[in-house]
Amino acid sequence: MRASTAGRFTAGFIALVATLVAAAPAAAHPVVSVPTIAGNAKVGAKLTASATVTKDGPATIDYTWLQCSASGAAACVAIPLATEKSYVVSVLDVGHRLAVRARATNAKGEQSPAERSALTAVVPPPVVPTPTPTPTPTPEPTVVPTPDPPPAPTPPADGSPATPAGGTDAAPAPNPLLAGLMDPFPVVRIRGVIAPRGARVSLLQVRGPFGATVSVRCEGRGCPRGRWSRGLGRIETLERFLRAGIRITIRVVRPGTIGKYVRFVIREGKAPYRRDACLLPGAEVPVKCPAV
């Protein structure tokens, strides 16, 4: 009799535990929508990602930009330091498709599964625009008067050669707006990791055509050097830990062509801010690069 009572008690206890386990709610975590990309995938264009949290209240969305194969297969790799909501397409992306990955994190530190966007079109190579010549209207026939002969030059008193009246003929200055882009156009690469109070740069490299000159300027507390000129290749002096607030300006120029301007600002807890622009021949102030 006692054994039967104990058996019924044990069976009832097991059934109660099973009921409580089945009724326990599943662990909550945020859910993020599939991100979308706005913008044209071409060199110099700005792409903007967009995603929303669809479950478990407010959360922070982190983005990671990906470079994928041109075939459209799921072979994608993360682009170094490309973790902002927006991304400017680089010449290094030519021949690839791009995508963005989104992940949400709520106030408890719980993360959603990562969601990847659809792939963009293949990034085409940049095309240097050819200036369109201005048509010259047919002039009306006019009567050209015969000019008076110029006065004879008067020799100076010190015996030096006389200067013809009207001064010397000077060749017109070349128009910098008609210059073409440096070919191949320079590429400035930076790679590293975000560190406390700054960033640790493992690669800072400039690639470009033969004959290009690179000038580097470092501003801010902790710069190893201030300003110097050099050739193409790695800038080992700045491949080190750089404090937040340091500003690095790189100019790549070659006579008669449009050059490259890049400015980095090291930030705390974020990827460095980057600005890319162009330099007209002989100019110091950067301008927006020609549309391609």
Image (tube, grey):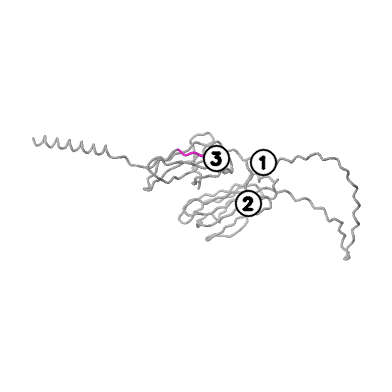
Question: In this view of the protein, which residue sits in the foreground, 212 or 114?
Answer: 114
Q: Quadrant of the C terminus?
A: top right
- Per the image, label 1 sits on a secondary structure element best described as loop
Q: Which residue is mark 2?
A: 286
Amino acid identity at mark 2: Pro
Residue 201 locus on image (x, y percent): 51, 53
Q: Along the polypeptide, which appears first: circle 3 or circle 1?
A: 3
Q: Is residue 267 above or below residue 65?
A: below
Decide: marks 1, 2 in contact (CB < 8 A)? Answer: no
Residue 219 locus on image (x, y percent): 56, 59
Answer whether residue 120 is magenta in the image: no
* Mark identifier at residue 39: 3
Residue 220 locus on image (x, y percent): 54, 60
Q: Along the polypeptide, which appears first: circle 3 or circle 2?
A: 3
Left or right, 160 with reference to 29: right
Q: CA distance from mark 3 to mark 2?
A: 24 Å
- Residue at 28 percent of width and 40 percent of height: 24
Q: CA distance from mark 1 to mark 2?
A: 19 Å
Decide: marks 3, 2 in contact (CB < 8 A)? Answer: no
Q: Nearer the viewer, mark 3 or mark 1?
A: 3
- Residue at 42 percent of width and 44 percent of height: 104
Q: Is residue 101 above or below residue 225?
A: above
Give, as a single range, the part of the protein colored magenta: 34-39
Q: CA distance from mark 3 to mark 1?
A: 21 Å
Amino acid identity at mark 3: Gly
Left or right, 194 with reference to 253: left
Structural crowding at the residue carrying mark 3, measured as other residues with C-alpha within 10 Å and reported as few (<14), some (14–19) or many (≥20): some
* Mark identifier at residue 129: 1
Residue 139 locus on image (x, y percent): 82, 40
